[in-house]
Image: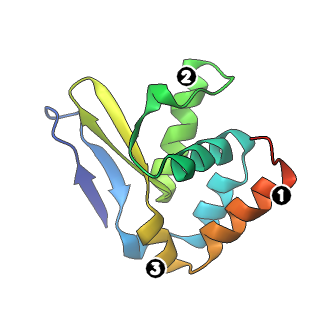
């Protein structure tokens, strides 16, 4: 089942998997990419929603959009439009409920591997 969120006009709502449909292999695939892991780390550090534009990645806009889509479709993040901004938050509660300790373990390992950022 896919849930829809967003307060924008039709066509601007984004599909998200329901908590029960989040699959471990998709989450691990999403977190395996360094750019996507950087997004997750930024969202975790912020502890709040961020506009996509607030998370700077050293890639093109189209590549950045691809990374956000993979994270959203895997259930790692939630995105919705607020006016012209696409707001993004980490689905920590959903991930912790489905895979207890996974996100904390991945984030801790990433910090040990790259403590600068």
Q: Residue at x 55, y 34 (%)?
A: 66
Tell which of 48 and 3 is nearer to you. 48
Query: Is 28 on the left-hand or right-hand side of 6?
Result: right
The residue pinned by badge 2 equals 62
Dividing the picture into quadrants, the one containing residue 55 is top right
Mark sitting earlier along the chain (3/1): 3
Above or below — where is 46 with respect to 19? above
Spot occupied by residue 94 in the image (x, y as percentages of width and height): 42, 70
Q: How many marks?
A: 3
Mark 2 neighbour density, 10 Å: few (under 14) some (14–19) many (20 or more): few
Spot occupied by residue 42 in the image (x, y as percentages of width and height): 58, 43
The residue pinned by badge 3 equals 97
Tell which of 106 and 30 is nearer to you. 106
Q: Quadrant of the N terminus?
A: bottom left
The residue pinned by badge 1 equals 112
Q: Which scheme is used to colour this image of the protein?
A: rainbow
Dividing the picture into quadrants, the one containing residue 12 is top left
């Amino acid at each position: 089942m896919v849930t829809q969120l967003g307060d924008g006009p039709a066509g601007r709502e984004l599909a998200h998997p329901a908590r029960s449909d989040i699959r471990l292999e998709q989450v691990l695939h999403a977190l395996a990419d360094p750019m996507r892991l950087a997004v997750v780390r930024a969202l975790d550090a912020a502890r709040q929603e961020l506009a996509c534009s607030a998370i700077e990645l050293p890639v093109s806009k189209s590549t950045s959009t691809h990374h956000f889509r993979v994270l959203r479709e895997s259930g790692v993040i939630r995105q919705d439009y607020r006016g012209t901004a696409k707001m993004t938050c980490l689905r920590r509660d959903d991930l912790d409920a489905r895979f207890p300790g996974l996100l904390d373990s991945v984030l801790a390992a990433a910090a040990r591997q790259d403590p600068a950022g």
